[in-house]
Image (spheres, helix red, strand yellow):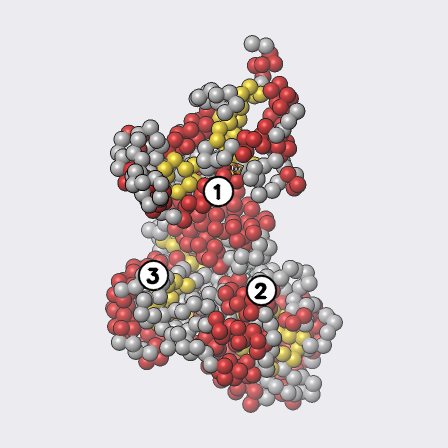
């Protein structure tokens, strides 16, 4: 079972199915891990041989992704989603309860190899948490009752596939619909419209729409598409970024669930505009449960002539889409890390330029767009660019999907025209006594109540979609600390400012949390913040200090009331550090103690 | 006291859990020593044998913090020195002495005082004159606030001189790349 090796014929099978291509390494590893939950050393060696790459390369990739394991794990792998929203819903207490019921320590497989209980970064279920992944499948709405059931199922060794269906039921929780979520797309209708316009006119409509990317950076989509269309090289690629790793974001999950056709049709519309023949959708590992339905939609579209050769009968318009899985790495949402990951490598962000539009997937000109961005292009094809641009604000046209979670009566998905005020959103989702809102996820911005008149738009409060609500009972220092822990965990380790800086920042935050903080730590924190912001290689590192900078600016007392000294204090108790020597020597005289455990003030 | 003497910078130095190698390197500034004595007045230091630190401008600390006495000395330096400088790998990271950190202290003491041939079963010394060991060797910045550090094991005399002459002249010390090394 656990120790059972993966046979060489199994390896050959999977490798051959992937045409022995080294750039399929990640997908191959994910498949090979499926049966036993981990990748034994012999498998890695055999795989390196079969693909003609070095063993170190294979191990480097396997070691990068948190859902790949090079050491044995429990047969039941239970990972609690670790976002602050879930903490506030009691996830840590539930995890402790589960551990004690199963007699296991957190983060360590049980001795019999039956089960391991640990945490994982936000799994995109903030509106129906606390949630966990049980062998990769999301289990929602955890309660003490549900935890008891899970402990029992594990003890009885009931396979996860036979657990009650209700555990796995994912709600869409759509509470406000506008153009996007009201769309009832007849598959192919948007494509038909764009084909009828002709390539140049379709691109012109995209320009008129002024659509900007919904994945965070807000780059103008038509500009990106034109750059790719104009780039030399015939083998262009369209990539849909469905990595959705930003804590508190889950709108792409709902789009993939309810409007998969629109997402794929958007990819096809992009292919039509830029002249791409290959499409890739990078689906985060946490959303793997969506894959069968997505594959079914793809199959249906192929048989309807909406994918494959001569799409809708158009000679020369050939395009198909393939789904690649991620394996638990937030940084892979960054578009160049995403390309590395699609090429089967570690998700290390590339140096830009060159930008993906000229040198992307396998060096080919590539468009990378967010799920929501691509789905929105269907609206533009159907209604025209000008109609699309009629909603929203001058610089932010159309609507935005918000993923709302936290302290409100109705968490879920809300679609608004850009320009909506924070206070309006709070009212609609039933939030009262709100102290702060974190917009845009851990990397985003924290707004205090005096800013609730501000508006969701690229020109005011930009967002990839997360909207986490904190009422006055919440400790915003703990919110920031949770986000810092997230960044420290997800830092890819490639550049020193972020690899070391995020850890230093977390250490400083932990020092304050443990009651050892001093005024000098605040100065250190601000210095690390600046270093991360200015010296990091990619957006992960430069965004990592955001939650700390915002809370220090807007909620400074949350830090100051934790300080024990105005000058400096060690992170540990000095007198306790002598305890072992006291025991060993049997001494307890005055010199065997520190009188006051304070540095001079 | 002459005017020159009054404007001299007061400098204290000490070695905690270090090997005196950093102090040796300090002496390696050779003929600059003549310049230095014009610029500074030494306070507590192995070079002067003054036992306690009075108010100073600069304190140089070699070595990490391995026992209770180190803590007392370090606190005295922090209390008395306007600018405290960690000098060398041991002060900055714990260095060589910190290699004991992965062994529990009691096991370490047992190994030395009870199990080792030749020492008999003398037991762990309990003389109150002996400072107790901390469970872990700590870099000095984990025990007090530190203003600057000069890396190296030891830093070269040249680096120490550059650093001190910057500091004394009122320039933010800056070590160029060749002078900045960590071994
Ligand atoms: C650390 C990091 C994580 C990111 N994660 C995502 C993500 O999960 N989904 C996404 O669409 N964009 C993400 N992005 C933004 C992408 O790099 C890229 O800008 C986006 O996919 C482009 O698509 P758009 O123009 O349609 O927004 C991330 C960026 C960074 C720096
Ligand atoms: S900033 Fe962080 S995530 Fe980005 S490349 Fe550097 S180490 Fe990796
Ligand atoms: S840093 Fe090197 S030279 Fe200096 S005290 Fe430590 S071991 Fe000795």
Where does residue A255 sit, x and y in percent of width and height? 48, 73
Name the quadrant containing residue A126.
Answer: bottom left
Where residue A330 appears, x then y in whole percent? 50, 63
Which residue is denoted by mark 3 in the rendering? A106
Q: Residue furthest right?
A: A232
Instruction: Quarter of the image for the C terminus of chain A: give it.
Output: top left
Circle 3 Cα neighbour tier, 10 Å, few/some/many (<14 / 14–19 / ≥20): some
- Labels 2, 1: front one: 1
Horizontal side, residue A361 vs residue A258: left or right: right
Q: Which residue is label 1 attached to?
A: B96
Tell me: residue B74, above or below residue A119. Answer: above
Instruction: Give SS at disc 3.
Output: loop
In the shown orientation, is residue A219 left or right of residue A111?
Answer: right
Secondary element at image label 2:
helix
Q: Quadrant of the N terminus of chain A?
A: bottom left
Are the numbered discs 2 and 1 placed on the same chain, yes or no? no
Question: Residue at horizontal 58%, vertical 14%?
Answer: B5
Is the CB–ligand 1 distance for label 2 below 8 Å? yes
Q: Nearer the viewer, residue A588 or A399?
A: A588
Above or below — where is B29 with respect to A276? above
Mark 1 or 3, closer to the camera: 1
Disc 2: which residue: A337
């Amino acid at each position: 079972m656990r120790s059972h090796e993966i046979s060489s014929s199994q390896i050959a099978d999977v490798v051959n199915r992937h045409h022995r291509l080294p750039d399929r390494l990640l997908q191959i590893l994910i498949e090979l891990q499926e049966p036993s939950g981990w990748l034994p050393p012999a498998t890695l060696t055999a795989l390196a041989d079969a693909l003609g790459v070095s063993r170190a390369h294979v191990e480097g990739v396997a070691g990068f992704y948190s859902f790949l394991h090079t050491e044995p794990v429990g047969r039941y792998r239970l990972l609690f989603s670790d976002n602050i929203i879930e903490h506030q819903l009691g996830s840590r207490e539930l995890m402790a309860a589960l551990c004690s019921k199963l007699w296991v320590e957190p983060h360590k497989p049980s001795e019999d190899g039956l089960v391991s209980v640990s945490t994982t970064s936000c799994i995109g279920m903030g509106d129906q948490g606390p949630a966990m992944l049980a062998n990769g499948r999301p289990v929602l709405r955890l309660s003490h009752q549900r935890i008891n059931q899970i402990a029992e199922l594990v003890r009885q060794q009931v396979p996860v596939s036979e657990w009650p269906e209700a555990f796995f039921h994912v709600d869409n929780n759509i509470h406000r619909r506008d153009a996007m979520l009201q769309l009832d797309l007849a598959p192919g209708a948007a494509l038909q419209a764009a084909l009828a316009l002709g390539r140049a006119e379709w691109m012109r409509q995209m320009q008129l729409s002024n659509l900007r990317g919904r994945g965070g950076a807000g780059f103008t989509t038509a500009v990106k598409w034109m750059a790719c269309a104009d780039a030399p090289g015939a083998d262009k690629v369209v990539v849909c970024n469905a990595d959705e790793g930003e804590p508190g974001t889950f709108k792409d999950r709902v789009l993939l669930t309810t409007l998969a056709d629109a997402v794929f049709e958007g990819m096809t519309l992009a292919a039509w505009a830029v002249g791409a023949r290959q499409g890739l959708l990078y689906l985060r590992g946490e959303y793997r449960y969506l894959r069968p339905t997505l594959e079914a939609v793809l199959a249906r579209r192929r048989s309807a002539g909406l994918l494959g050769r001569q799409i809708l009968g158009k000679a020369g318009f050939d395009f198909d889409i393939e789904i690649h899985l991620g394996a638990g790495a937030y940084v892979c949402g960054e578009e160049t890390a995403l390309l590395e990951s699609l090429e089967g490598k570690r998700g290390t962000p590339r140096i830009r330029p060159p930008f993906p539009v000229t040198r992307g997937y396998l060096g080919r000109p590539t468009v990378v767009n967010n799920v929501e961005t691509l789905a929105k292009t269907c609206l533009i094809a159907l209604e025209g660019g000008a109609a699309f641009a009629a909603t929203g604000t001058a610089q932010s046209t159309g609507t935005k999907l918000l993923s709302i979670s936290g302290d409100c009566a109705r968490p879920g998905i809300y679609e608004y025209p850009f320009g909506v005020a924070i206070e309006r959103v709070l009212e609609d989702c039933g939030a009262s006594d709100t102290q702060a809102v974190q917009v845009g996820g851990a990397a985003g911005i924290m707004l205090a109540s005096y800013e609730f008149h501000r508006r969701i738009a690229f020109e005011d409060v930009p967002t990839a979609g997360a909207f986490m609500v904190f009422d006055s009972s919440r400790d915003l220092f703990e919110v920031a600390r949770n986000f810092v822990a997230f960044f420290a965990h997800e830092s890819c380790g490639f550049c020193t400012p972020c690899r070391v800086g995020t850890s230093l920042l977390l250490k400083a935050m932990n020092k304050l949390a443990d009651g050892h903080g001093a005024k000098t730590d605040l100065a250190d924190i601000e210095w690390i913040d600046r270093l991360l912001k200015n010296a990091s290689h990619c957006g992960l590192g430069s965004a990592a200090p955001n939650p700390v900078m915002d809370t220090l600016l807007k909620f400074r007392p949350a830090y100051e009331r934790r300080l024990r000294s105005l000058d400096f204090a060690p992170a540990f108790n000095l007198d306790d550090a002598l305890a072992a020597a006291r025991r060993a020597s049997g001494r307890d005289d005055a010199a065997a103690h520190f009188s006051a455990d304070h540095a001079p003030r | 006291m002459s005017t020159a003497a009054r404007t001299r910078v007061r400098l204290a130095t000490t070695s905690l859990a270090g090997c005196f190698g950093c102090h040796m390197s300090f002496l390696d500034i050779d003929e600059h020593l003549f310049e230095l004595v014009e610029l500074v007045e030494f306070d507590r230091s192995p070079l002067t044998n003054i036992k306690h630190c009075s108010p100073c401008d600069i304190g140089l600390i070699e070595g990490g913090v391995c026992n209770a006495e180190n803590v007392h000395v370090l606190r005295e330096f922090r209390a008395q020195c306007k600018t405290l400088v960690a000098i060398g790998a041991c002060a900055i990271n714990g260095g060589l002495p910190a290699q004991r950190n992965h062994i529990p202290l009691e096991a370490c003491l047992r190994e030395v005082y009870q199990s080792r041939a030749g020492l008999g079963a003398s037991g762990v010394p309990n003389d109150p004159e002996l400072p107790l060991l901390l469970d872990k060797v700590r870099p000095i910045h984990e025990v007090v606030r530190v203003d600057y550090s000069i890396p190296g094991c030891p830093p070269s005399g040249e680096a120490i001189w550059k650093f001190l002459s910057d500091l004394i002249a009122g320039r933010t010390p800056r070590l160029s790349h060749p002078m900045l090394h960590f071994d």
